[in-house]
Image (cartoon, grey):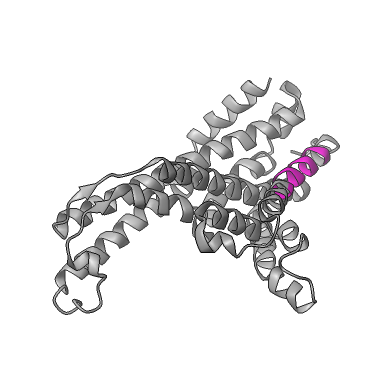
Amino acid sequence: MLADAIRSETYRLSKNRTALFWSVLFIPIISVVLGVIAIIVAKAHEADLAGKLPPELLQRAPLNLAESLVKSAADFANPIVLLFILIGAATIYAGDYRWETWRLISARNTRPNLLTGKVVVVIGLTVLATLAGLLADIITHLVQALILSRSLSFSMDGAAFTDFVQLTLLSWARIIQFTMLALLAATVTRSLLAALFVPLVISVAQFFLPQMLMQMGVSPEGWVAPLLSPGLAADLLKALIHGGMEAAGLPPQAALKAVTGLALWIVGPFVAAVAYFNRQDLSKE
């Protein structure tokens, strides 16, 4: 049963404190520490930095937590967060190869259910990391309000709430797409190191791909670039969500191209991993 696979993977992850720390807690803790240090330094040198600090900071304008949450949702799927969530995802996907436990559990459930259970747990890990990141952002702003004597506000209209939900879902989709590469790499190579490094190598190549395509005469406004680069597809969707001039300059059918490209890199590796896993000999694991 799929529920049994999800429950067992969740239990195993809950006992892996190292993976949970690096994937969920490390980045929020570091962001709070660095944020507090920056606030203290700014306060100590407020007079010297008077001409360099933003005007709203000098005027003691209220801090709008809602605006901060929307910005955090937009920036959550950044390369550093992707890297550290990958640690937990690779551990989940390649753990049974590393610990040689596949042969012990594969007889108790179907293979597609076993892989799907791992994917669902990685999605849950992503949600936890998101909540931890948002909490860290709120803590940082509370400290900023306390040290810099600024008031707090929370003003979120319907449009801002819609942006927050859409940007959060987009960040989750980008993270899941990135970790799908780890699933496929772990299944094909049976290696934890491959599950860690293959997504990084592919993502770096995809980052430079649009520029390479332009040099080859392929227009960035066509279908090729979004289909081959999920990072570009995510950026197109983010621009559409922000709207305004940023969205006005996008190529025709940008939404369709971006959604298709991102979905292709989520579904494709998962289907390939399941198909390969169904034919794989697990006698040595």
> For the N terminus, which image quadrant?
top right
Residue in the foreground of this view, choosing between 210 and 39: 210
Is residue 18 in view? no
Magenta highlight: main SS: helix
Q: Tell whether position 154 is magenta.
A: no
Image position, residue 184 (x, y; %):
73, 47
Q: Is residue 34 above or below residue 112?
A: below
Residue interval drawn in magenta: 264-275
**Left or right of residue 152, residue 23 in this image:** right
Image position, residue 276 (x, y; %):
82, 41
Image position, residue 145 (x, y; %):
19, 54
Residue in the foreground of this view, choosing between 2 and 234: 234
Image position, residue 277 (x, y; %):
79, 38
The residue positioned 63% from the left and 52% from the top of the image is: 178
Q: Is residue 258 above or below residue 164?
A: below
> For the C terminus, which image quadrant?
top right
**Left or right of residue 162, residue 250 in this image:** right
